[in-house]
Each structure stands twice: as structure tokens, then as C-alpha cells.
Image (cartoon, helix red, strand yellow):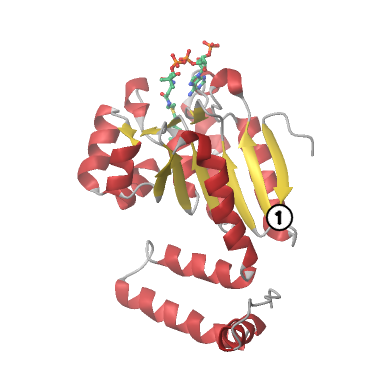
Amino acid sequence: MEFQNILVKIEDGVGVVTLNRPKALNALNNELLTELIHVLEDWDRGNEVRCIVITGSDRAFAAGADIKEMAPQSYMDMYKANFFAQANDRISAIRKPIVAAVAGYALGGGCELAMLCDFIIAADSAKFGQPEINLGVMPGIGGTQRLTRYVGKSKAMEMCLIGRNMDVAEAERAGLVSRVVPAAELMNETMKAARTIAERSVPIAMMTKEAVNRAYETTLAEGVRFERRVFHAMFATHDQKEGMAAFGEKRKPAFEDK
Ligand code: DAK
């Protein structure tokens, strides 16, 4: 597939997708989302990519869903197309770890896309917000749900009802981003984190991701039971034997993804 709206590269087992609609501040139109989903699913199925990074430009990770594309749609258009269901369902079904590297605006669907990733590393220039209320709509790719889980009800309500953006200091304090780095270091720091993940066992990372995500979907008791079962299952893998043997032998483990 030829891509018109994203750039892709693979480096040291890390697949990097750069959103690339600079004239529209990477607004998420249908074509861009189709390309993004295509490449994510392709990398998730194959063996070459072990960890994924999604990023944008210095000015914008993504300034939201494409308002110009949405504006003329009717209720029936939206309903029949099941608008944004694909983006939410298929990106959240990716099993390999995804890191968002966010600089500049991450607004509306851009903020929601960052939250669909497993964690967010933010440049000190990043701004997060759900300004849909200013357009007479509300978040539609999980913003009301994921933002609330990340930052709690009070901040989520304020952001969704007023459309106020958060700067990175507030986003880090509130737990929306895992850490903040100088803008010039964003990709270096993100690639360092992604390479570290890529050096580990892919299936163990996938199981770990699944277990952490379970925390959002079930009770504490069920989540801990799920974690314990998966933990037990890891003792059937080569990579557990290798990881623990390497520790005892004071050497670097050679994981084989099995
Ligand atoms: N869509 C389309 N184009 C956009 C855009 C967007 N979201 N954001 C920016 N652009 C375009 C601008 O129109 C402009 O294009 P030209 O006029 O040059 O052709 C270009 O990018 C540069 O933008 P500005 O000239 O405005 O740049 P500034 O630096 O002055 O301002 C800004 C940057 C990010 C503050 C501003 O562009 C802005 O406020 N953008 C809109 C942010 C926003 O409102 N995002 C939320 C979009 S709505 C659903 C329900 C709802 C939704 C989805 C699903 N369902 C129920 C399923 C809604 C989702 C959204 O994300």
C-alpha cells in the first residue's frame, strides 16, 4: 500500500509512523486513519517490528479529527459509516506495545489517538485538549472515557466541557503522560524507550500489555486473578527460562520470542 498521509520506517525492530499532513496540522481524516490502521495491523502480524512509535511534527501530533471532512456529514452518514469505530476498535486491538511521541498540539482526536497508545512521552511543547465542545460536538474516539481514566473526573469534565488545553506540566502531574522531555530530545528519548522494549521478548511484552489493559476493564480481584494466570503461563515459555538463567549467569539474556 502506498501512503499519502503517513511516513513509515523500521529501525532496530521499532516501527515508526509519522503522521504527515502538515498543512492541516495532521488532522485525522479517513484516508490517514485507514493508512495508519493498515500499517499498525501489518506490523502487529509480522515479526520484523517489535515495538511501535506513533509521532507527528514539532507543531502538531494531530490537531483533531478533520473538521472539514466531518462538517457536511449527516446523522445517517455518521451512523452508516460507524464513524471512528474502526479507529477505536482496531487500534486498541493492536497487541504489540505502542508509544506515542507527542510534540505540539494533541487535540480532540489527536489527544484520543495518543491515549489509544500504551504510554505517552511528551515534548515540553505539547498541549493536550478535547475542544470538541467548541464545535458543537463531543469527543468521539473514546475521549470522554479514556481521559477520565487517565486524569480523573474533575479534570476530564473541565477539559471536555470548557475545551481547556493542558500544558505538559499539568499533563505529567495528572498522569496523562509518562514523562516530559525537551522538544529537541523527543525522538531520541522515545526511540531509546522503544528500542529497550524491542530488545525484550515480544510475546512477554504483549502479555504484559494485555494484563495492564485489563485493569481498565474489570474489578481489582478479577484483574489480579488474570495477572496471576498469565504470570503462571509465562513459565511455559523459553524466554522465562532464558531470562532467569541469564540473571544467574550474569549475562545478557538472548530472548527468542518463544
Ligand atoms: N481539522 C481540519 N483542519 C485543521 C484542523 C482540524 N482539526 N486543525 C487545524 N486545521 C487546519 C486549519 O484549518 C489550517 O488550514 P488552512 O486554513 O491553512 O487551510 C491549518 O490546519 C493550520 O491551522 P491554523 O491556521 O488554525 O493554525 P494555528 O496555529 O492558528 O492554530 C490550532 C492551531 C490547533 C489551535 C487550531 O488549528 C485549531 O483550533 N484547530 C482545531 C482543533 C480542534 O477543534 N480539534 C478537535 C476537532 S474535532 C465523533 C464525535 C466527535 C469527533 C469525532 C467523532 N463521533 C461521535 C464518532 C470529533 C473529533 C475532533 O477531533
On the rendered structure, is 54 left or right of 155? right
User: In what quadrant of the picture does the N terminus appear?
Assistant: top right
Residue 160 placement: quadrant? top left
* Residue 192 in view in this figure: yes
**How many labels, in total?**
1
Residue furthest out toward the right: 1
Residue 29 versus residue 62: which sits nearer the camera? 62
Q: Would you say the beta carbon of the disc 1 residue lies within 8 angstroms of ligand 1? A: no
Residue 159 picture location, percent across and down: 28, 34
On the rendered structure, is 119 left or right of 163? right
Residue 234 picture location, percent across and down: 56, 83
* Residue 86 in view in this figure: no
Which residue is rendered at x = 63% and y = 76% of the image? Answer: 252
Vertical relation: 84 (above or below) 25? below
On the rendered structure, is 6 left or right of 215? right
As helix, strand or loop, the secondary structure at mark 1 comes to loop
Residue 68 picture location, percent across and down: 52, 18
Residue 54 picture location, percent across and down: 58, 43
Which residue is rendered at x = 56% and y = 27% of the image? Answer: 26
Residue furthest out toward the left: 154
Residue 182 versus residue 67: which sits nearer the camera? 182
Vertical relation: 68 (above or below) 39? above
User: In what quadrant of the picture does the C terminus appear?
Assistant: bottom right
Q: Amino acid at mark 1?
A: Asp
Residue that label 1 marks: 12
Residue 199 placement: quadrant? bottom right
Q: Residues within 10 Å of mark 1 (few under 14, many from 20)?
A: some
Residue 177 versus residue 192: which sits nearer the camera? 192
Vertical relation: 3 (above or below) 86? above
